[in-house]
Image: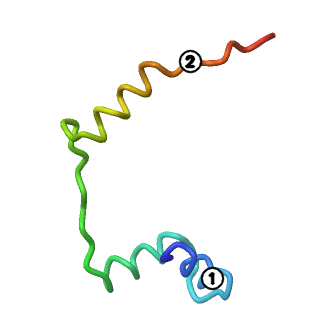
């Protein structure tokens, strides 16, 4: 949602660029930083999927 708002504000020339939008968001919203947990259950499944995923052979 915030991304859409930022694009609309830039389109209306209310903001100059993405950096301006990031500045507005960081000063007006309480931001929470999430750090990935490599031991989480979902990380285990993602690793399992990546290890069994087949890659396509590219033809020249």
Instruction: Give percent across and percent down for residue 54.
Output: 56, 18
Side of 47 where 21 appears, left or right? right
Side of 37 where 42 appears, left or right? right
Residue under pointer 1? 8
Look at 27% across and 73% down and name the residue there: 31
- Mark closer to the observer (1, 2): 2
Look at 31% across and 82% down and name the residue there: 29
Q: Quadrant of residue 26?
A: bottom left
**Mark 1, residues whose alpha carbon is within 10 Å: few (<14), some, or many (≥20)?**
few
> Which residue occupies the extreme right position in the image?
60
Task: Give the numbered dot on residue 54.
Answer: 2
The quadrant of the picture occupied by the C terminus is top right
Q: Earlier in the sequence, mark 1 or mark 2?
A: 1
Task: Give the numbered dot on residue 48.
Answer: none
Q: Quadrant of residue 37?
A: top left
Instruction: Give percent across and percent down for residue 7.
Output: 61, 76
Question: Residues at badges 1 and 2 in contact (C-beta under 8 Å)?
Answer: no
Look at 52% across and 72% down and name the residue there: 3
Tag 2 secondary structure: loop
Look at 25% across and 79% down and name the residue there: 30
Q: Quadrant of residue 45?
A: top left
């Amino acid at each position: 949602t915030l991304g859409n708002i930022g694009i609309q504000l830039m389109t209306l020339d209310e903001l100059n660029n993405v950096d301006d939008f990031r500045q507005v968001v960081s000063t007006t919203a309480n931001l929470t930083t999430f750090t990935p947990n490599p031991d989480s259950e979902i990380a285990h499944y993602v690793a399992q999927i990546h290890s069994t995923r087949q890659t396509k052979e590219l033809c020249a």
